Amino acid sequence: MADSLHIVCPHCEAVNRVPVLKLAAGGNCGVCRQPLFTGQPLDLDFKNFEKHIGRSDIPVLVDFWAAWCGPCKMMAPVFARAAGELQPRVRLAKVDTEQESGLAAQHNIRSIPTLVLFKEGKEAARIAGAMDLQNLLAWTRQNL
Ligand SMILES: [Zn+2]
């Protein structure tokens, strides 16, 4: 593994180089000084999606969801808790498929919620349907 990893700031999208040994402590963005990990999922849209997926050296787990989807709403607090568990090993993010229908189409999202795990800019795994915390964590760790 590399000595340092590129981490994209969730606030200003600056690409930070973070020593692996310091990653666990989270740290702040060198540009905007805000925390690189907030313990919450990050909202992605067509403007910041490519940067976070393409420039991040840590895997990014994306929840494709919509406000009208009952199972998505049920899973939202689970996903938020998973962010607390998995970050900074994994970045957790959400895409509102109604607002961002282009991203949903580009990634061939046929049902929601769908979770897609991206590694080095490429899709590594996906799973559709709501999950509880235990299954979500197990599925993610299994695919890292
Ligand atoms: Zn920043």
Image (tube, rainbow, N blue to C red):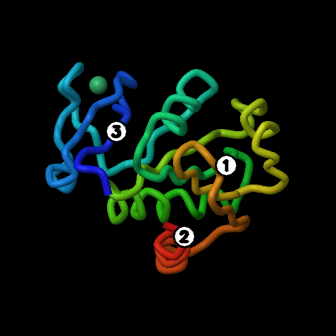
User: Callout 3: 10 Å neighbours few (<14), some, many (20+)?
Assistant: many
Disc 3 residue: CB within 8 Å of ligand 1: no
Question: Which numbered disc covers residue 7?
Answer: 3
Type of amino acid at the residue the image marks with label 2: Asn
Task: Give the Cα distance between marks 1 and 3.
Answer: 24 Å
Asked if the residue under mark 3 is in contact with the one under mark 2, i.e. CB atoms within 8 Å, the reply is no
Give the image quarter of residue 16.
top left
Residue in the image at 73% along x and 65% along y = 128
Asked if the residue under mark 1 is in contact with the one under mark 2, i.e. CB atoms within 8 Å, the reply is no
Residue in the image at 41% along x and 50% along y = 58
Looking at this view, is 90 or 39 the one in front?
90
Q: Nearer the viewer's eye, disc 1 or disc 3?
A: 3
Position in image of residue 11 (x %, y %)? 35, 27
Task: Give the Cα distance between marks 2 and 3.
Answer: 20 Å
Q: Is residue 42 above or below residue 59?
A: above
Residue bearing the label numbered 2: 143
Position in image of residue 40 (x %, y %)? 37, 48
Q: Secondary structure at mark 3?
A: strand
Give left or right: position of 42 versus 64. left
Question: Which numbered disc covers residue 65?
Answer: 1
